[in-house]
Image (cartoon, rainbow, N blue to C red):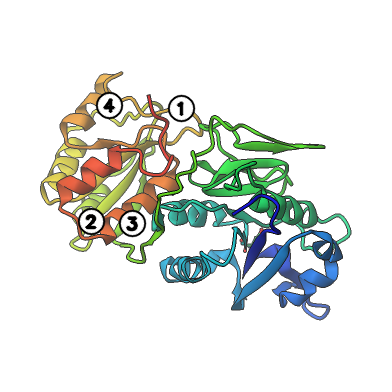
Amino acid sequence: MSSEERSSILIIYTGGTIGMIRNSVTGALESFNFDHLLRHVPELRQFNLNISSRAFNPPIDSSDMNPALWGRIVEIIHTNYDKFDGFVILHGTDTMAFTASALSFMLEGLMKPVILTGSQLPIGVLRTDGKENLLTAIEIAAAKNADGSPVVPEVCIYFHQKLMRGNRCTKTSADSFDAFNSPNCTYLATAGMEILYNRHIIRPYDASAQLRPNYKMSSDIIIFSLFPGIKQSVVEKILSGKELKGVIFRTFGAGNAPQAQWLVDALERATAENKVIVNVTQCSTGSVKMRLYETGLQLLEAGIISGRDMTVEAALTKMMFLLGQSLPVDEVRRLMKKNLAGEITCG
Ligand code: ASP
């Protein structure tokens, strides 16, 4: 496609604060329909773009997001993939980092922009952050190189002047406009007077790639966080669960756990029962390095896999995706360590 042609953008409205309005009787925030967005952001009509929309009916608070609804987003993107140059997903902020991470694995071979955004204040409120987030997300989704290829052919979150790789993001503030960060990955772009792209970080465009949508996700997983004084009987009960197939094990510092034999034994038993256990740090920056201390080495010896610098959101949704593909357990373990969609810093 030539860069002269008018780009087409599909906005997928799932819900969240960006599209909410205050109920005058109860005072609570409630979802309202997508047409209100157009009314509150008339600037949308000024873009030299073809903009279409699809909306969840009813829109949801993102606390109610789940794998079936991720599948619905994947299906909308898949069925409209050839008709649009880019996709903007309006989503509640609370679980946006989970959705962005999940989509990065579910949309294999993606070579078009999928930009998630939302807001901390509803779009109808005077000081809303939603307008800038929405307008810039659309501009990024429509951005093309001179040869007509998309500038950002991957799943991202755009929020408060930062474009971040979706599967490197975490919601870091419940009330600031600057609500997201990608602590272990440089921003893909920053938006001031100009949008400045960090092209060396952005996934290179591959014209031969084919979109392969994946819908199967396993939820037989738990996120299990260590704390000083954690109790043997509780840990043993959790790790011996019959349905349990995978554990995102949140450890201290560079991937360390207490040197208690009962803990190593419980982890070894779970590993022997074909449960996949991935070590991610409780720290917000940095990486798991299990060979650094004895307290990490014992985990490596118990068969625990290093999640390196993956966010909890990325490690969890990657495991949901891999376990959902019914792969042999050794293959799941191998792929958990491998960078599949930019979720791990390589090198
Ligand atoms: N509870 C809302 C949601 O995640 C918050 C937001 O949109 O920012 O849907």
Q: Earlier in the sequence, mark 4 or mark 3?
A: 4
Q: Earlier in the sequence, mark 3 or mark 2?
A: 2
Q: Nearer the viewer, residue 277 or 201?
A: 201
The Cα–Cα distance between marks 2 and 1, rounded to whole angstroms, is 27 Å
Image marks 1 and 4: residues in contact by CB distance under 8 Å: no
Residue 202, given in percent of the width and then of the height, sits at 54, 37
Q: Label 3 sits on what residue type?
A: Met
Left or right: residue 46 compared with residue 282:
right
Tell me the SS state at disc 4: helix
Q: Earlier in the sequence, mark 2 or mark 1?
A: 2
Residue at numbered disc 2:
245
Query: In the rendered image, is residue 27 in sight?
Result: no
Quadrant of the displayed image that contains ligand 1: bottom right
Q: Label 2 sits on what residue type?
A: Lys
Q: Label 1 sits on what residue type?
A: Gly
Q: Earlier in the sequence, mark 3 or mark 1?
A: 1
Q: Residue at x 22, y 54 (%)?
A: 237
The Cα–Cα distance between marks 4 and 3, rounded to whole angstroms, is 25 Å
The Cα–Cα distance between marks 1 and 4, rounded to whole angstroms, is 15 Å
Nearer to us: label 3 or label 2: 3
Q: Residue at x 33, y 41 (%)?
A: 230
